[in-house]
Amino acid sequence: MGEQRWRGLGPVQTDGLECVVCAASFRRPGSVSEPVGRSDTGSQVFACQGRCLAVARAPGAPDARRLTFWRDNRRDGEFSLPLTEVAALFAASPWAEVAWRLDRKLRAFLTDPECAVSAVWDDHAGYAALVELVGTAGRGEGAGGT
């Protein structure tokens, strides 16, 4: 069996310096990672030990790390984004600092016409993975914060 190929990663993840799941930096002292495949450029990529490693090694993980949206609630407005990109956009938004439950903040961010995504979704598994990714980051296990 060949190595998994990861597409849609950020440039630092593609270079193997951040987790492919939660985007935690491996340049921090004490960070521990394991290889999980190759980026589309051929570089070896890594995941944090623990939950991220289990997610990264799940069948189909490299292809299942995107979330599909519909702009203006229309099928002809369909687009998809890598979960890590959505998590980073959320972390940089004012919604990340609102004193609400994570699920409520994410839903508000994703549908806010003033924010980068401003769309609806029907991908429950993808949304659950996004909540997990952002929640992991908010507990200090990755990048992003809540």
Image (cartoon, rainbow, N blue to C red):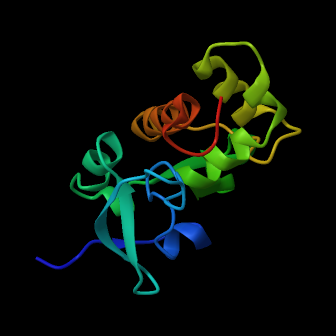
Between 77 and 126, the one nearer to me in the picture: 126
Q: Position of residue 49 (x, y in %)?
A: 30, 48
Q: Residue furthest bottom?
A: 42
Residue at figure coordinates x 40%, y 86% from the top left: 42
Residue 8 seen: no
Placement of the N terminus among the 4 image quadrants: bottom left
Residue 74 in which image quadrant = top right
Between 12 and 39, the one nearer to me in the picture: 12
Q: Position of residue 21 (x, y in %)?
A: 44, 52
Residue 94 seen: yes
Q: Residue furthest top?
A: 100
Horizontally, residue 39 falls left or right of residue 13, namely left
Q: Residue furthest right?
A: 114
Q: Position of residue 44 (x, y in %)?
A: 37, 77
Between 95 and 124, the one nearer to me in the picture: 95
Placement of the C terminus among the 4 image quadrants: top right
Horizontally, residue 105 falls left or right of residue 47, namely right
Residue at figure coordinates x 64%, y 42% from the top left: 144
Residue at figure coordinates x 59%, y 46% from the top left: 143
Q: Position of residue 122 (x, y in %)?
A: 51, 36
Horizontally, residue 98 falls left or right of residue 56, namely right
Between 65 and 31, the one nearer to me in the picture: 31
Q: How many marks?
A: 0
As drawn, 103 above or below 42: above
Horizontally, residue 77 falls left or right of residue 113, namely left
Residue at figure coordinates x 58%, y 69% from the top left: 12
Residue 4 in which image quadrant = bottom left
As drawn, 121 above or below 49: above
Q: Residue furthest front?
A: 29
